[in-house]
Image: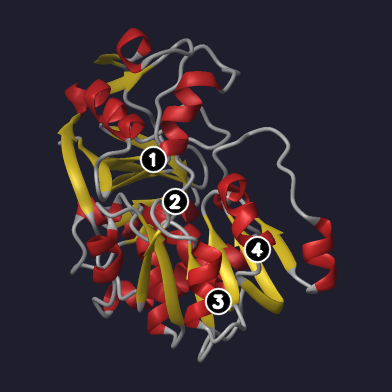
Amino acid sequence: MKAAWYERNGAAGDVLELGDMPTPTPGPGEVRVRLATSGVNPSDVKARRGRPLNTERIIPHSDGAGEIDAVGPGVDHGRVGQRVWIWNGQWRRPFGTAAEMITLPEAQAVPLPANVDFAAGACLGIPALTAIHAVNLFGDVRGKTLIVIGAGASVGHYVTQIAKARGARVIATASATRAAHARSAGADFVIDYKAKDVAATVKGLTAGKGADGLIDMDLYSTTSIISNGALAPHGKIVCYGSSMQGDIPVSFPTLLWNSLTLQVFVVYELLSKDRETAIAQLTTMLEKNSLKHAIGERFALRDIVAAHEAVERGDIIGNVVLDIT
């Protein structure tokens, strides 16, 4: 099979290679998926740049979609031919979705509704699952005001749609170039965080009370918003990322005297029950065509270097997808 891989960390153009590898055979409890698409996420390029390799070769990317073409012992043969999307394709496993084939435990190949194309399927494992779990952590959001940091980015765009569908009021942050994209997801108000004081604007939009919650893509840059009163007492912060990988100072007095909750998670390590809930909810939304999928740019597998460089630049609005077949 054709595949892309790297054998050392470094710049995309220096370490990514394209060539032939043996076609994998599914083991017990596994399925083999003939991939049509592979999603390229920021975590994939960060791993290529600096995550230590614990194997000789890495086929990158955790997200993808395609059709099951073989099953291993113990798997219902009726799954052959099923359209699926993939989660954790390259998490704690060396070979991900930047290849024509992948084998993995059958639970990690989720049925993809017929009305959803493979490009959208490559956006579900990290962006959509992160978004739906983040909203789930607030419980019932009907009538609540949520701040969505980075609503013009991939996860934030899904978060905004899901929160709005559940009855929340969404105050979003986005740059001027991404503001229209955030509005297209249903945001009630979009704050240009580069031009306005986010906390002051939120307080103005909430009659001085502050928002009930905040869903955050970058805790490092959001701590000042929290410290300056953007959240109402007993509010909650749900965070799934940060641009700073080291220690981040958070104002304990702000958390303490406002009884704020700070909850952090990584989508790769969801508890089984939480992941099952999120997948079931996501499937329902997909079947109802109630989610918009933003595909920013598509590349062929042979152009994986350009795809990684596009994600690193951060100037594409929407998800970056590789077309495998």
Task: Say which mark, if any, is on residue 203.
Answer: 3
Pick the quarter of the image with the C terminus: top left
Q: Label 3 crowding class (10 Å Cα cut-off): few <14, some 14-19, many 20+?
A: some
In the rendered view, would you say 129 is above or below 209? above
For the residues labelled 3 and 2, the Cα–Cα distance comes to: 32 Å
Q: Residue at x 32, y 60 (%)?
A: 78
Judge whether residue 67 can be spotted in this image: no
Horizontal and vertical percent for residue 55?
A: 56, 16
Label 1 SS? loop
Camera sees residue 322: yes
How many angstroms separate mark 4 from mark 3 (CA)?
10 Å
Q: Amino acid at mark 1?
A: Asn
Using the rendered view, name the quadrant where residue 179 is placed: bottom left
Query: Which of the two discs, 4 and 1, labels the residue nearer the N terminus?
Result: 1
Spatial separation of the CA atoms under disc 1 and disc 2: 8 Å
Q: Callout 2 environment at 10 Å: few (<14), some (14 to 19), or many (20+)?
A: many
Q: Position of residue 235 (x, y in %)?
A: 68, 76
State how far apart marks 3 and 1 are (Cα). 33 Å
Which residue was labeled with disc 2?
126
